[in-house]
Image (cartoon, helix red, strand yellow):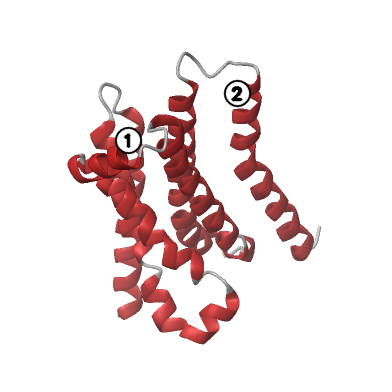
Amino acid sequence: MNQCAAIDAFRLLVLVACSAPAAWLGWQWFFGDLGAVPGEAVVHVTGKTGQVLLLTTIAFSPAFRFTGWVGLMATRRQIGLWTFFWLVAHMLAWMGLDQYWDWPWIRREMVELPYIRYGVAALLLLVPLAITSFARVRQAMGWTAWHWLHRLVYVSAALGVAHYWILTRADYLLPSLFAAVLAALVLFRLIDAAIHRQ
């Protein structure tokens, strides 16, 4: 298999992997297997999926450094847009299935609950990244400005981890894992930047 075919196959794999949770949620919803509060289950699944994909997007850069395979960078924008999709779905699921579009109550929750504020901030930081993820926009901005803007992904990921950590009540295994992965990725970024400055 040549490199182009391998990249196309990897793109297809990314498409299947990123869309699979939607198929699973639809199946579980249709057959009533999402538990006593299905809306809450949808909120949780969409949020966890978005956070996993966000960390995966960040991890593709060090993975490329280690492997040199261009397929990782070729699909990073694809995963980034899927990340944005899932986190928007998470927000909409929370507003619609959990808060029933009660806008006064939603505003009150955003003001009073820190983890909601962190989650909203994390999503808002991804908006300019999604808008500027296309090649023409990147060319218009210039590489340096685009590169600096897209470092906001680390801030968004940290806010996402804080959001998940605060709302967790008992089992901290997954939020701890998210925090550890993010810390490792940030450390790699700092070491890599220091090496390339020398």
Q: Which mark is residue 141?
A: none
As displayed, is residue 135 above or below residue 66? below
Vertical order, 160 against 194 (above or below): above
Residue at 31 percent of width and 44 percent of height: 161
Residue 31: tell me if it is visible: yes
Tag 2's secondary structure?
A: helix
Amino acid at the residue labelled 2: Trp
User: Mark 2 or mark 1, which is nearer to you?
Assistant: 2
Viewer-proximal residue among 178 and 27: 27
Q: How far is mark 2 from mark 1, CA to CA?
A: 26 Å
Q: Residue at x 55, y 57 (%)?
A: 81
Which residue matches tag 2?
29
For disc 1, the neighbor class at 10 Å (few under 14, some 14 to 19, many from 20) is: many
Q: Amino acid at mark 1?
A: Pro
Q: Where is residue 44? Give x, y as percent.
A: 43, 31
Check residue 175 in the rendering and tell me which mark sits there, or answer none. 1
Image quarter where the N terminus lies is bottom right
Q: Residues within 10 Å of mark 2 (few under 14, many from 20)?
A: some
Left or right of residue 17, residue 55 in this image: left
